[in-house]
Structure formats: structure tokens, C-alpha cells
Amino acid sequence: MTFQLFLQQLINGLGLGSLYGLIAIGYTMVYGILRLINFAHGDVMMMSTYFAFFGVSIFALPWWVAALLAMILTGLLGISIDQGAYRPLRRASRISALITAIGVSFFLENAALVVFGSRPRAFYRPEMFRAIWHFGDISLLSLTGYTILITLCLLVIVYFIVYKTRMGMAMRAVSKDMHTVPLMGIDLNRVVAFTFGLGSVIAAVGGILWAMKYPQIEPLMGIIPGLKAFVAAVLGGIGNVFGAVLGGFILGITEILLVAFWPELSGYRDAFAFLLLILVLIFRPTGIMGEDLPE
Amino acid sequence: MALLESSNLTMRFGGLTAVDDFNLRLLPGELVGLIGPNGAGKTTVFNMLTGRIRPSSGSILFHTDQQVNIIGLKPNRVNRLGIARTFQNIQLLPELSVLENVMMAWHGRLKSPFWAPIFGLPSYRREEEAMIEGSLELLDRVDLLDLVDTEAGNLAYGQQRRLEIVRALATRPSLLLLDEPAAGMNPNETNDLMRLILEIKQDFSLTILLIEHDMKFVMGLCERLIVLDHGVTIAEGLPEEIRRNEQVITAYLGERRRADH
Amino acid sequence: MKDAMQYRQARQRWSTKNRRRNRILTLAAVLCTCGLLFFANRFADEYQIRILNMVAIYITLAVSYNLINGITGQFSLEPNAFVALGAYSSALLTMTPMEKGMNFIIDPCAPWLAQICVPFLPAVIFGGLMAAFFALLMGFPVFRVRGDYLAIVTLGFGEVIRVVANNLQTVTNGPLGLKGIAPYTDLWWTWGLAFVTLFVIIRLVNSSYGRALKAIRENELAAESMGINSFRHKLLAFSMAAFFEGMAGAMLAHLITTISPMLFTFFLTFNLLIIIVLGGLGSLTGSVIAAIAFTWGSELLRAVEEPTDIFGWFTIPGIPGMRMVIFAVILIAAMLFWREGIMGRKEFSWGWLFGLVPGGKQKKSV
């Protein structure tokens, strides 16, 4: 493999990893504050692509309006899932919330199958994402470049929210100790709802970029990216948004390079993330940037 | 030879030092009280001594003549070595019966493998019988014999406290750590509890370290006291000495003043 | 001390007497079921026998799944993975070299596997052992770190099994799957396995080990402080559940005789989750009742996917996939409004049954 080709694959890996990272942010924030694996997160991302799809195909909206609308709708969907399904179980045992989460995930998948049909739909890729950029010998789909840029921008925004705003401070306080927070005059429920909303909006960005990349969508498309994004979150250190994106990058790059070096293993690509998860649990359970969250 | 010796035990959470340079030397058969205002780090000390949390630095030796190092051991290993504890906020299994709560404490010593009860091996049945018998005897001591089949969650508060002590005893400790055993008890119950503690200490040849806020209780029971404030040991000595210690009085007055606000 | 002695003796007399009675009654109940199976075998039609087989397999799966989820309280999503593992392992073992030759048409079967052919029972047990082995492999890192990763790890493992079954052409025959597996499974096998599973898991749960598992579920902090090694007990519960799930998978393979990677989807796990939740997380009795009810009920629910005729006046078109939506709604609703399920954490006992009969004397249950 030449160095150019290697660089090429590296950038492709970064592009894929950005998508994992964007989904992983929502996972990691929710786990950070509620210790809940939100199994429905991947399916929320799937829903965002359908929102955007219908915005463009049925309502004939310009793609960026459809994308913005889809982000808002997905955020609302995330919040309503939390309020409707998880909130009543905040004081119940943790297993109840987890079972509900898997129920919501299964519901979204199958309701989408019934309503949208199982046939994959072609997703619109706007003009500006179709161009090919050339850097010397490396050529790059502009979508990949934009994906990486958008991810980094969003990371800065999320950093600002988490570390510089009152709401972010509350989020971090909840993740340290959920039970003392109400004593500090913070409305726990608003913090949780905000977290779900933010995570879902970012997942929507990831979902729409994902749909443009392939460019088609189907109701079960959220499962595998969802699983991998969770692996990315654990790899980076659960509870840490930087870790989530970093974990996404690492997962995306290793996955692409693995297939590039050993094409005969490409069928096992989806199993690789799982192997990585087990290795992380064995050798560095807190992830790269993680600290030990209290149980 | 000391039963337990901790040197320079320190625990930091993030930037906060919960316990700083804590030194403890317990001789076999002692009854020592660990006192101090709220948030002084007393329970953190217990958590370190029982393997619940790993100290940031320092050492804990159990049976100093055999140099048994406790740092890094899991709570169940520490318990098997002979250190048992009760909890400040009672940690029973509310849905299991009183008897089951005590029998559970036998499990760590069970010799039969998991397939022994499945095949109904006599060796297991003997162990189970011994478990029941031993648990009933212990429950008899604390007047809970009539309640063996009650769900532990349905017991009165004082009964739950006693059940927790009995459960700790069932693990056959040589060192017993009691975290606020008298909390929430009325004066009568407190007196009974004092008698009980002295009794079990005698009968099971225990060494006891206890945390308690009730000064009358501590002064009447303990042979020696250690006072913690903000993670630092500010005084150590006989109850009478502690009673007159200026620093201790200030620490407690400070708390009362804080509480008044 | 005398009090305790007397108390214990009275208690023991009472419990030995009851134990003997209960043992006889249990034996009688098992014999009755066997009698029913005998009649079913002779007189029931194919469809009914198929359902009875599925009921037994679902009982086996639900009871083992409840051991890890309900009794030990560790949320796991493993059954479809272990069922697939057991099904493939045993099917490959019982196939004759000639059958393998007929199946593996794209790539020949791996040489180390091609000549192997063993009888049914060892193949079933091997299927269980394979599942238990992988349970240990997964449980080791997970339980050492954080138990709540178990769900995602087992969910991922299900995907891995599917990926491997699709790609490991020379062993699993890839997407084509395996056809013409010998139909060894009959009512005696499936119900035999269900009874063995029930026997083993009930005995375990009622022993000191069961108390330890429940202690871990209710309060891991207290359990560990009382000397219980929670890591080892979680591993025990998880691998034992896997063992029986693997064997159930072997039964399934030799019942339906055709398996492929598409067969063992997450839907199976989801069904079992509904069963143990509706039966009551932590109640083995509940799992048995719910498994029976669910297998019948889900047959009835097939109706919503087929066109329904209402008195011949008009036709409601069937909605494919609607069944799964309904299942999802049932599960969420149960978690929100009916967390106890049918049995809560209670178990059936003969003493309880006698308490129902007027005049039947009922003392404290032991």
C-alpha cells in the first residue's frame, strides 16, 4: 500500500468515524447522567433521516430547511421518549429503564417498518456534497470533508454548552451525583430533558450525513451504527463527549484500515467493533479519556 | 501485635481530601469509637477498611504479625479475612425474610459447589442445616426469633439495626465495624443496644470500631476515642480526655453553629 | 439457647413432613403431564404438536433467561445468540458426512468437521456447552468491569454470531444455512429438557446459591460486604442460563430441520423478554405461565398480519409487521404500568395451593 493510499483511507476512516462520534455523543451524555444505555438512540437517528427524507420528497423543501426541521423534530422525539418512557421509571430499578429502552428501540424499528415500509429509499445528496476535492494525489468526496468539519464544529459547540453554560454545569453535576442535585436548586428533569434533546439533535446531524453518504435509508439502518457508536463511547471513555468523538475516530479509522489491509475480512467488519469493545473492557475499562463514574 | 493497623491513610475525591493521613492501631479486644461532625470522613474510613473504596495512598494491615495487606482487596475478600460491617443507612435485603438475610451471610463460607444442591448431595444438606441452626441461634440472641419469616423490609427500625448486626456476626468476624448503630433509636433501645454490643464483644471475642453521634452512647461504651474533623484526626484518647479537649469542643460547636443557620 | 433449639426442631418436623408431601405431589404433576404428552403424541395433529413443542422450548428459554435477568438482576440480551450457537453446533454434529456434502455446495465443508457425526444427545449437550463457554468468555470482562454493559455486549454478540454464520462459509455454509437436519426432536425431548431445566434452576434458586444471586440483585453492596463474590456468582448464573439456552437451540434445530443466519434474530430475545416481564421478573413460575400463554397468544396475534373478514361484509387488510409493533407496545406498557407482572417475585408452592382450599391448613411457608 502506498502512502497516498494510506492517507486516503485515513481520511475515509475519519469521515466514517465522525458519524460514529456524532451518534456516540448522545449515548455518552445520557449514560453519563442517568447510567442508562439508551438503546433507542440509533433508531432515533434513523427517524431523523426519514424526517429529512419526507421534508425533501413530499414537502419539496430545500434540503437545508428539511435538515434543520429534521433536527428539531428529532430533538423533540428524543425529549418525548425520555418524558414518556424513561421519566416514570427514574426511581424504579435500573433494569426497568433498560427494558423500556429496548422496548422503545424495538417499537421505533417496527413502527417504521410498518409505516415507511421495508424497501430502502434513495436519499437526496445536495450538489455541494457531490464535488470531489483533490489534494495532490488524494481525492476526497466533499461530503466526507464537510462531515469531518461539521463534527469538529459541533464538538466545539457541545464543549461550550457542557463547560461554559449553567445547564452544562448542571449536567456535569448530575453525572457526579444525581441525588444531591435537586438539593442544589437544579431541576433534574429539565437537565435530563435537555440532554436527551441535545443528544438527539446531534444524532440527527449524524443521521442525515450518514444517509447522504450511502445514500439510502431503511428502517433498520440505526441498529448497527447505534451499536458501534456505543462502542465508540466506551472506547473514548463513557460520559466524556470528547472521548465519544475520539472513540468514533479510532473506530472508524481502524475499521476502514482493517478492510483496506485485509479485504478478505470485509465480511467481518461489523464484528470488529464488538471485539474492540471486549478488548477495551479487558485492558482499559474506563476508556481513553474516561474517569471512573460512580455506579 | 495489633489486629489492624492503618498508616497514612488518605482518600482524595477529585480535588477534595476526604480523609487525610489517618492512622489507626486496634489491639485485639478493644472497643474504639470514631467520632466527629458530619462529613468528617468517618464512613470513608470504614469504606477503605472494608475494601469498598481504594485509598489514594497509605497502608492497611490486618493481623500485623501476619502482615495481611488489605489494600486492593475486594469487599468480599476483606470480609472473608474477618472484617464485617454494618451500614449507616441500613442495607438489608428488604424482600427476603429475616432468616434468609442472616443465612446469606453464611454463603461466603459455603464449601459445597453449586451442583451440590442441584443433586441434593448430603454434604450440602448438612451445611444448609448448620446454616439454619446457626442463624436461628443468632436471631434468638437479638430477640428476632419470632420474626424469622417476616420480610426484612417490614421490620421496625430498631429491629432492622439489630438484624444488620446479627448478619455481620454471621460472617464470623474478628473485627466488627458498626456505622452509627444507635441512629434513630429511642433511649430504651439505645441502652439495650449498648448491652448487646458488650455481650457480643465478650461472647465472640470481637474487636469493635464504631461510628456514633450519640455522645452518651460513645462515652459510656468505648474504651478509646478517635476524633475526625474534615478528614483530619484532631484528637485521640480516653473518653474523659476527649470530653475536655478544646479542639474537639470547637469542632462540635462549629457544627452546631452551622446547623443553626 | 434452648428457645432456638426447640424452635428449630418444631420447624424441621414441619418442613420434613411437608417436603415429603410436596415431593409426591410434584412427581404426580410431572407424571400427569407425561400422560397428557402421551395422548398428544397419538391424537393431536401436526400443528398442535408443533405448538406444544414450542411451548416447551419457550419454557426452557424463559426460565433460563429469567435466571440471569430476574433472579440475578443482570440485564442481558443473549438468548438469540446462544440459541443460534446451540442450533448450529448440534446440527453440524449430527449431520452425516454425506448430508454435509449435499449442504455445502458453494464451498466444501472444513475437513476437520466434515467427517464428524455424533448421536443426538451428545450433540445437544455439546450445543449447551458451546453456549456456556462463550458466556464465560463474555462474562469475564463484563462482570469484572460494569454489569450494565452486559446488555450491549450480548446484543453485539448476537450480531457477531449472525456475521460469523454468514461469512464462515466452510463451517456454517454461510447465508444458505443448513437444510435436512435430522428431525430427532419430539415432544419427549422438548418437554424432557424443559423439566430438567426447571428442576436444575429451581433447585439452584432455592439453595444458598439462589440466596446469593438474589442478594446480588437486591443489594450488591451488602452482598459483597457479607463475603459473597458477586463476580463469580454472576458468571455462574449467566453461563448456566447459556447452557440451557444452547440446548434449547439444539432442540429447535432438530425440530424445524432448516436453519439459517436469518432465523435467530433479536425478535426471539424480545419475545422472551416480554415473557419474563409479563410473568414477573424473578418468578420462575411466572415465566412458565407466561411462556405457555405467550406461545398460544402470539399464534392468535398472527391474525393482525392477515386480512380479516368481518361477517363477510368488509375486509380489514392485514398489516405485515404489526405483531412486532404490538409486542413492543405491550413491553413498554408493562414496564410503565404493570412492573410486577403476573407473579411478581412469588413462586408457586403446594403449600400455597393448600392454603387456597378451605380447611387446608397453611402455616408459614418455609
Image (cartoon, coloured by chain):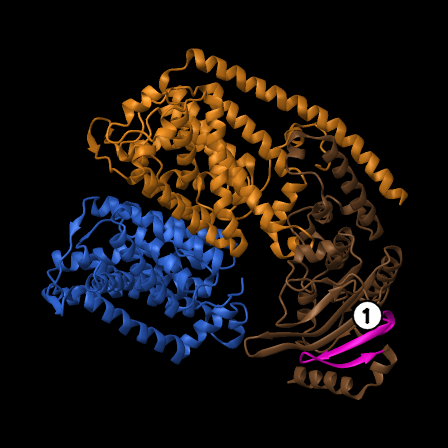
Chain colours: A blue, B brown, C orange
The residue at 25%/44% (across/down) is: A114
- Left or right, A163 with respect to C11, comes to left
The residue at 58%/34% (across/down) is: C201
- Residue C88 horizontal/vertical position (percent): 38, 31
Residue B234 is one of the magenta-drawn residues: yes
In the picture, the quarter occupied by the N terminus of chain A is: bottom left
- Residue C308 horizontal/vertical position (percent): 25, 31
**Tag 1, which chain?**
B
* Residue C212 visible: yes
Snapshot quadrant of residue A158: bottom left
The residue beneath circle 1 is B32
On screen, C71 above or below A46?
above
In the picture, the quarter occupied by the C terminus of chain A is: bottom right
- Residue C171 horizontal/vertical position (percent): 34, 33
Q: Which residues are magenta?
A: B217-237
- Left or right, B105 with respect to A9, comes to right
On screen, A14 above or below B237?
above
Q: Residue furthest front?
A: A2
On screen, A59 above or below C336?
below
Snapshot quadrant of residue A55: bottom left
Element class at badge 1: strand
Q: Residue furthest top?
A: C42
The amino acid sitting under disc 1 is: Val
